[in-house]
Image (cartoon, rainbow, N blue to C red):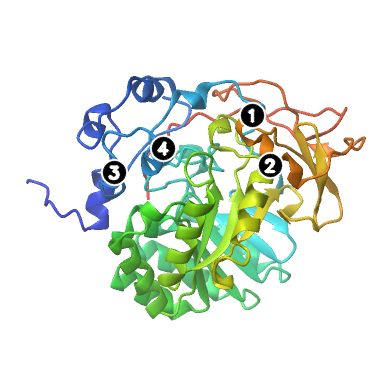
Amino acid sequence: MQQEQNPTNWRWQMRNRIHTVEDLAQYITPTEDELQAIRATEGIFRWNITPYYASLMDPHDPNCPIRQHVVPRMSEMAPDIVGVVDPLEEVAHSPVKNLIHNYKDRVAFCVTAECALYCRYCLRKRMVGDADFFLNKAELQDAIDYLAAHPEIRDVLLTGGDPLIFSDVNLEWLISRLRAIPHLQIIRIGSRLPVTLPYRITDELVNMLAKYHPIWLNTHFNHPKELTPEAQNAVDKLLRAGIPVGNQAVLLKGLNDDITVIKELCEKLISYRLRPYYLYQAQLIGGTATFRTSIEKGMAIMEALQGNTSGYAIPKYVLDTPYGKVPMNRSYLIGRAGDYVVMRTPRETLWAEPNPIPPDEEAYRRMLPEIPLPAGIATIPIGAPTFVPTATENRLSIGGGGAFGKRQPNTGTNTQ
């Protein structure tokens, strides 16, 4: 039987995701660099694109910000200062599979390893699309049992992958069991589907979610081009169901590291009644150097926002570390020590973030004082590794040592 053609149906979008050069060529004219990267990254980090999101790409401009999000480039395979695949030590903070307990009263629960598409700067490259990180019902129940046994946990974030990849039935099975735990006050959902697959936000979905309030949702718009009428409709459905929606953008070099772009993004977000929540410094995931800016440039962008737009339109600029999120302001930032930015964390420890200043960002060096690197400070070791299936990872003190972990191969398919 011929498959029904309904591009506004989210399941149709998932079935028809773009994952071959032939499919991609229907939307863009791939460059030689992109074609080479598609071959080179095979087995390292998957690529998939929904037809909806592909329709937003400029077919002729390889520097299109939408295109850079999702189409592999050879820069992913270039030597990087790190080869880390788990810079936040999420695996080390996982008492049961895919449940990250790094804060006393909050957990992040990676309920799936599947996304609608794969962002090239992804924080969880180590797991997305990898069959080893999918959870069966018994493993989901193990995590629920852990939450029930720990009354200090009041807040659970459903993340992944993308939890809205679940069917309504499977998602309700999970959320209803979480809501039955008396000490869980808040259930949060982290999902990029309002951006990459807005048709997933159906009346049936939001009506189901509304039965289990308080439910909060954070999504992930990075560029004004992503703020389409379809995305606005998805956000509006969530809001009308009583689900507050926030936005967590990532500062990405060449995509949105410009005050004009960030200001337009944030002002358009609040016109959607969507609060800019965080602006993240891009993480030190091996193979993502092309996306990382200096922390000083991010500080300069935040300085330029202050006083020049509505207060509601100004997100908090943060860096995630193994010791918690650190606001990127002078209350926490101590100074620059060569290629490291030294900061105080919320746990009163010091952290040195490897963050060389690119040659084209030297003008921002003035934002932080030069200081010596404190002896014994915790950091990520730097060198010139390449992000490949056997890339290594570790967190060390300067002059310390430790065990290295092995990158897991990406062999998974959508099993939800």
Residue at label 1?
Answer: 359
Dots 3 and 2: beta carbons under 8 Å? no
- Residue 182, x across and y down, in percent: 62, 78
Indicate which label's residue lies in the foreground, 4 or 2.
2
Amino acid type shown at disc 1: Pro
Indicate which label's residue lies in the foreground, 3 or 2.
2
Indicate which label's residue lies in the foreground, 3 or 1.
1
Horizontal relation, residue 104 to residue 318: left or right: right
Rounded to the nearest angstrom, the CA distance separating label 4 from label 3 is 11 Å
Amino acid type shown at disc 3: Ala
Residue at label 4?
Answer: 68
Dots 4 and 1: beta carbons under 8 Å? no
In the rendered image, the vertical position of residue 387 relative to residue 89, given as above or below: above
Residue at 50%, 28% (x, y): give it.
409
Rounded to the nearest angstrom, the CA distance separating label 4 from label 2 is 25 Å
Secondary structure type for disc 4: helix
Residue at label 3?
Answer: 54
Amino acid type shown at disc 2: Tyr
